[in-house]
Amino acid sequence: MKVFLSTDMEGTAGVVDWSQVRGPATEYEYYRAQLQAEVNAAIDGALAAGGTEFLVNDSHSTMQNLRPDELHGRASYLSGKHKPMYMMEGLDASFDAAMFVSYHGSAGATSSVLHHTYNPRAIAEVRLNGRIAGESGVNALVALAYGVPVVLISGDQVTIDEAQPFCPGIESVVVKESVSHNAALSVHPELARERIRDGARRALDRLAAFEPPAITTPAELTVRFHSAAFAELATHIRTAERQADNVITLRNDSPLDLYRSFIATVLLTRGVPE
């Protein structure tokens, strides 16, 4: 059984501040180890349910946060920030399941700790087919394209609630309760790992009940930016349509092409000076 894991960092138990997820810093070194432990817990649970092959896509920030020799299950490790398919690089139709570990709430989810959607400096909100979508919903487009079910997500409750419409029945692991953008009540790291391990095992135990993400095609992404300057730049994407000064829409019959267009938009907006 082949399992793909896309790992972020803001959803890790105990994380509440950018200094904890951006290196180099003492705080970052501590929390990258906590992320590593949560990823390994997911692999442990998947192993217990019959998982045989694992690919971990390190998807946070510079995308080089984990230590490959410490990954359980002899998982393959995909790292580095220049990935054409970004957080979903490496996924294809050969995988049986996908898992999202240490994910966070969307840009519009103000009650979720460190909430954002891909580029916090540029993007104020993303909607997929009219529903608010975080990175889990956007990334589910790639899973849909390859017919792979997304079976697990870990983070806070807001993150789980946002994933449910696109991945109904997803195994949901809550490791903290967000209080504000920079505060959360987290369970003990050992309990967080236990929950993730058990959740991964349960998810694969009932894999036969899962379907690929529930996203109707042709699909539409509506992206609201913090300023008109970002929207103007995004119109350089061939399929982008300007809906308002700071809003564009992207539409496509192909979920994979729609995702690619969105990633191109993200990369363009990263080039705008502050």
Image (spheres, rainbow, N blue to C red):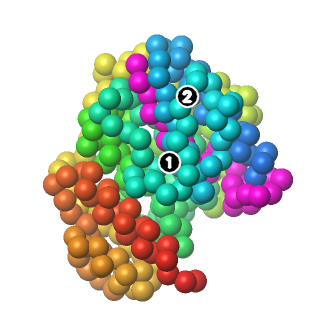
Question: Could you say which disc has been placed on residue 159 in the image?
Answer: 1
Q: Quadrant of the N terminus?
A: top left
Q: Quadrant of the C terminus?
A: bottom right
Question: Could you say which disc has been placed on residue 21 in the image?
Answer: none
Name the residue at 33% across, 33% down: 149
In-image side of 55 versus 263 (left or right)? right
- Depicted 252 relative to depicted 154: above or below: below
**Precedes in sequence: disc 1 or disc 2:** 2
Q: Residue furthest right?
A: 26
Q: Position of residue 185 (x, y in %)?
A: 70, 46
Residue nearest the observer in this picture, 212 or 47: 47
Residue range (magenta): 1-27
- Depicted 197 relative to depicted 112: above or below: above
Disc 2 residue crowd, few under 14, some 14–19, many 20+, Cα 10 Å:
many
- Depicted 249 relative to depicted 245: above or below: above
Report the amino acid beneath label 2. Answer: Ala
Question: What secondary structure is marked by label 2?
Answer: loop
Judging by the rendered image, the residue that carries numbered circle 2 is 75
